[in-house]
Image (cartoon, rainbow, N blue to C red):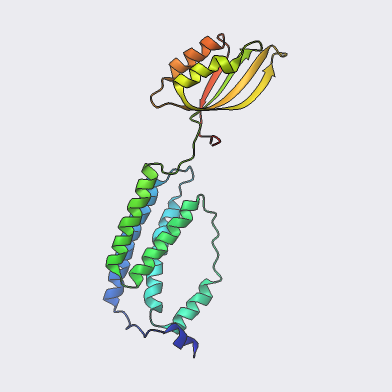
Amino acid sequence: MTIEELFNIGGGVAPQKPQEVAIAMGISLALNLIIATIYRKTYKGTRYSQDYVQTLIIIGVVTTILIMVVSGNGAVAFGMFAAFSVIRFRRTLGQSRDLAFVFFAMAIGMVVGARLYSMAVIITAIVGTAIYLLTKTDAFAPRRASHMMTLRMTSDMDFEALLKPVFEEFTDRVQLVSVSSAQAGMMTELRYGLQLKVGVSTPKLLEALHLVCGNNRVVLTPTGNELDS
């Protein structure tokens, strides 16, 4: 069996007409524009790249063209496989989901290139909706400290007993990060990760903390650090 026969198992596919190629490219462009929009709407990082989003669209459309060109032509398919095997990504992706979007765009490009237009639309709608809902509901998010708190109390104070009522009233979760002495051992400096309850008033929390620590220094800083399970 020759290489061409191997790639043509199942029979060949009639060459596409220019009009059909143009329609497929138009559908692929439209669907990949939707994918790019979903990526932009759901992106949460700090390294958003316009270049990456435009590349997603290009990858999807080019994949459609390639699938239509190699369809039913084993020799061309083998040649393209050999050529593209030497290509390497030169850009470090910022998030794991960036790679997933690359595969998403390529998959839609392949399905459109196979002329399964209805399936491509359905896949884009289902996967796109799933991505949007997972992002907006913050599904599977780790437990995070909403604030980091640093405060000082005199060394003779039982900080655990004094702070416990405050934490029960204002927080859902607390993690002691560090304990250290200050001012020649006269003060104890405490650092906590706090997950505040929904709707908690920060001024009221600070007021309660000042009461229990004798009006000593209290620093409350918003953050996104993960809390241990």
Which of these two is toward me, 224 or 209?
A: 209
Q: How far from the left and from the top, in percent, is residue 192?
A: 57, 25
Identify the residue at the far bottom of this view: 1
Q: How far from the left and from the top, in percent, is residue 151?
A: 58, 18
Which of these two is toward me, 192 or 83?
A: 192
Q: Residue at x 63, y 19 (%)?
A: 189
Q: Is residue 83 above or below residue 155?
A: below
Q: How far from the left and from the top, in percent, is residue 162?
A: 55, 14
Q: How far from the left and from the top, in percent, is residue 196?
A: 45, 26
The answer to which quarter of the image holds residue 76 is bottom left
Q: In the picture provided, is 37 more to the left or to the right than 203?
A: left
Q: In the picture provided, is 19 more to the left or to the right than 213?
A: left
Identify the residue at the far front of this view: 161
Q: In the picture provided, is 71 more to the left or to the right than 145?
A: left
Q: Is residue 198 above or below residue 7?
A: above
Q: Is residue 23 above or below residue 91?
A: below
Q: Residue at x 45, y 56 (%)?
A: 100
Q: Residue at x 44, y 15 (%)?
A: 204
For the C terminus, the image quarter is top right
Q: Is residue 160 above or below residue 138?
A: above
Counting every numbered tag in the picture gives 0
Q: Residue at x 31, y 73 (%)?
A: 21
The answer to which quarter of the image holds residue 72 is bottom left
